[in-house]
Image (tube, rainbow, N blue to C red):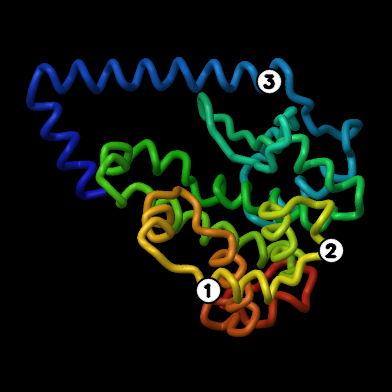
Amino acid sequence: MIISIFIYISLIVSIVGIVYIVLGLVIGFFLHGLRIGHIRNNGVKLTEKQFSNVFDILNRLSKEMGLKKVPAVYVIQSDGILNAFATRFFGRNMVVIYSNLFEIIKTGHEDELAFVLAHELAHIRRNHVGKQMLIFPAMWVPFLGSAYSRACEYTCDRMAAAYTGKGHKAIQGLMMLAIGPALLKDVDVDEYLLERSKENGFFLWLSHVTSTHPPLPLRIGEIQEMSRFPQLYGYETNLFEVNNAPQLM
């Protein structure tokens, strides 16, 4: 935040800086608006009559997480990509789930999808999208912006695991992003983490520090650590053994 304020002040004191700020904001706003328009034009919105089981999960999680308004959730075709994201436009929050990820409800992975949904709702609850607008200039500082983004991802993973109350399903949900739903049951998670711990090198490090998301093995390890020592994360009980909303200490 301090770096962002310094950059904003430095730019504002010059006419050229003002032009750059305005131009950047206008272009960014326009492109974001086009993306949102495409999603709302073509995506399938969750409603009481459209995927009602997931819609019920959405409403329950939104209430438990203290959201003032249930965000719109759209499912959109994704060319095989397993992903989801939260966004905001004109004060309206929205969650987008790619269809290849949403399809896991057809194979009995509703709890894993609930974790993914809770993760995106956590971004909204923590106002990460709004905060990124405030610190946008600092996001261009090498490694700083990506480090902040990774911290946000860890936060949302922990919140999602807590509010869904099924940590092992959270781990499976993350593992699914690595290998897909079809092969999930054949993966040894401990072996996956062990082999990743043996990997090292400059480009592995560089990939990590420049990425907006932590490596999946580290995210899985964080959830495992949270299950062992929930008190260190501000919770009274083992979140992997309860199904209701967590009670903060």
Asked if residue 59 can be seen in this view, the reply is: yes
Q: Residue at x 59, y 39 (%)?
A: 86
Reply above or below: 223 against 127.
Answer: below
Q: Foreground residue, 53 or 157?
A: 157
Q: Residue at x 67, y 35 (%)?
A: 96
- The quadrant in which the C terminus is found is bottom right
Residue 173 location, x and y as percent? 72, 58
- What secondary structure is marked by label 2? helix
Question: What amino acid is labelled 3 in the image?
Answer: Arg
- What secondary structure is marked by label 1? helix
Reply above or below: 165 against 111.
Answer: below
Dot placed on the residue nearer the N-terminal end, 1 or 3: 3
Residue identified by numbered label 3: 40
Residue identified by numbered label 2: 185
Gap in Å between the C-alphas at discs 1 and 3? 42 Å
Residue 237 location, x and y as percent? 67, 82
Residue identified by numbered label 1: 197
Label 1 near label 2: C-beta < 8 Å?
Answer: no
Dot placed on the residue nearer the N-terminal end, 2 or 1: 2
Gap in Å between the C-alphas at discs 2 and 3? 34 Å
Residue 103 location, x and y as percent? 84, 41
Q: Residue at x 75, y 43 (%)?
A: 101
The tally of labels here is 3
Q: Residue at x 89, y 39 (%)?
A: 52
Reply above or below: 139 against 49.
Answer: below
Residue 210 location, x and y as percent? 38, 50
Q: Quadrant of residue 156?
A: bottom right
Question: What amino acid is labelled 2 in the image?
Answer: Lys
Gap in Å between the C-alphas at discs 2 and 1? 22 Å
